[in-house]
Amino acid sequence: PRRSSRQASEHFPAIGGARKVTSSESQSNLANADKVRDDRRDGRVLVLLTGGTMAMKPNARGSLEPRKGYLAEQMRLMPELRERRMPAYEVVEYTPLLDSADMVPADWCRMATDIAAAHEHYDGFVIIMGTDTMAYVASALSFMLEGLRKPVVLTGSMVPFAESYSDARRNLVMALIFANAGGRVPEVVIFFGDRLLRGNRTTKMDALALGAYDSPNFPPLAKVGVALNARYDLALAPDVASPKCHAFVAMDTQILVLRMVPGFDDAALLRCLEADRLRAVVLELYGTGTAPARREGLLDALRTARKHGVLVVATSQCARGGVVLATYEVGRKLEEAGVIAAGDLTTEAAATKLAYLFGRYPGDVDKVRELVSVSLRGELSHPDVYLRPFFEDRSLTGDGARISRSNSMTAPPVPEGPAKHRSFAAPDPAPDPSP
């Protein structure tokens, strides 16, 4: 049975620089004859309001800007949040409220620390933030929250509550529902539009669409329509190895991201790679990991990076598929120069994973090199998932259809087909992931 956290507010330590602004028990909530007391709800969710469009309101000049207490006002007027099936919640507002473009790793650490401190007192967590760097935050938190056993759902909106056609209302309601999913989704996820996506598989694909996010190389954990089409069998297993949730905050963010373009200056790349204190470079290459390897200047720069102990990790500029350097001879030359293939890691996941690994294993470049290509939080697929030959060796994947969840490389995408539909009120238990 799920642990009830109804008395969480009495035990949750105060968050520095933040304040509780509303809850499901607020006396100023919309009057409702069917109001349900918190102690009769199934679960309690902590909402961390960090900023973003959802918390913005037009100023006197017509420009959107964060407004203290505004989201709390809107939540008090939402009858959906009074329903018995919805979890109890508390909203803690950060000060100052930030545009996500202003967020830095210190803000990631703050969120991770607050979640770890409250982990045993709530059934799940929602982070409301801006959309521009949400994929970076979700990826970072997936590594930083060690021993996580409860859902952490990031969400926001493309249109503020102040507009009549806002997407904020549904994103918020669904984030609360999934945050109360308990052990079925014990990982960091993003809910946006109509899909629940693994956080470290997600990237922002559209600057204007309401469904701004996609997970190009891993299927959604859930799709929302008239019914809930859930694939909780693809979710990570709870991290039971750690006795409690811990926030790892010693991130080493001396990471550089460079995108390969035709005709770039090899000397400029060399100067970047020789920079003091640089730990790693994420190099966005073409296709499955190609670059102009006939240019000795590029190869010399990469060899210099290796001599200086700087890791060069290759991701693909393509949204789908992954890097396998040995596919082409030009890629093999890069591999011989010390470049590490990042598989189908997103750039967001690659950069934050490197920051985590260099912080976790300071000075041990070989250990970091080894773990880059190992899936730690479901962020990486086995190469067989996206680079299968026409005539398969079925022994590579057992039955040739899927990779077991016990494999750290996680499950490959599954074809569309009939999936179990689950009621929000009485969800089915998670399927047994064993073959």
Image (cartoon, grey):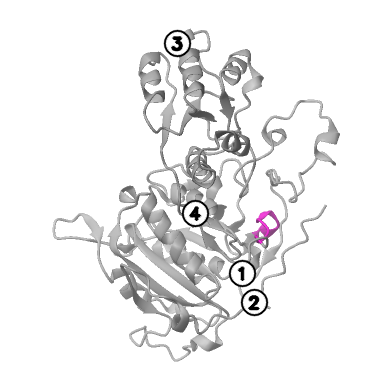
Q: CA distance from mark 3 to mark 1?
A: 53 Å
Report whether residue 115 is seen.
Answer: yes
Q: Quadrant of residue 321?
A: top right
Q: Nearer the viewer, residue 15 or 314?
A: 15
Q: Quadrant of residue 275?
A: top left
Mark 3 is on which residue type? Answer: Gly
Q: CA distance from mark 3 to mark 2?
A: 59 Å
Mark 2 is on which residue type? Answer: Arg
State if disc 1 and disc 3 touch (CB < 8 Å): no
Where does label 2 land, which residue? Answer: 2
User: Quadrant where the N terminus lies?
Assistant: bottom right
State if disc 1 and disc 2 touch (CB < 8 Å): yes
Crowding near the residue tagged with mark 4, few <14, some 14–19, many ≥20 C-alpha atoms within 10 Å: many
Where does label 3 land, which residue? Answer: 297
Measuring from the top left, give residue 320's x and y in whole percent. Answer: 57, 35
Where does label 4 land, which residue? Answer: 141
Q: Residue 60: give its label.
A: none
Q: Residue 182: give its label.
A: 1
Measuring from the top left, give residue 311's x and y in whole percent. Answer: 51, 29
Query: Which residue is rendered at x = 35% and y = 18% of the image?
Result: 268
Left or right side of 380 for 247 = left
Residue 431 part of the magenta segment: no
Measuring from the top left, give residue 168's x and y in whole percent. Answer: 39, 62
Report whether residue 194 is seen.
Answer: no
Boundaries of the magenta span = 230-239
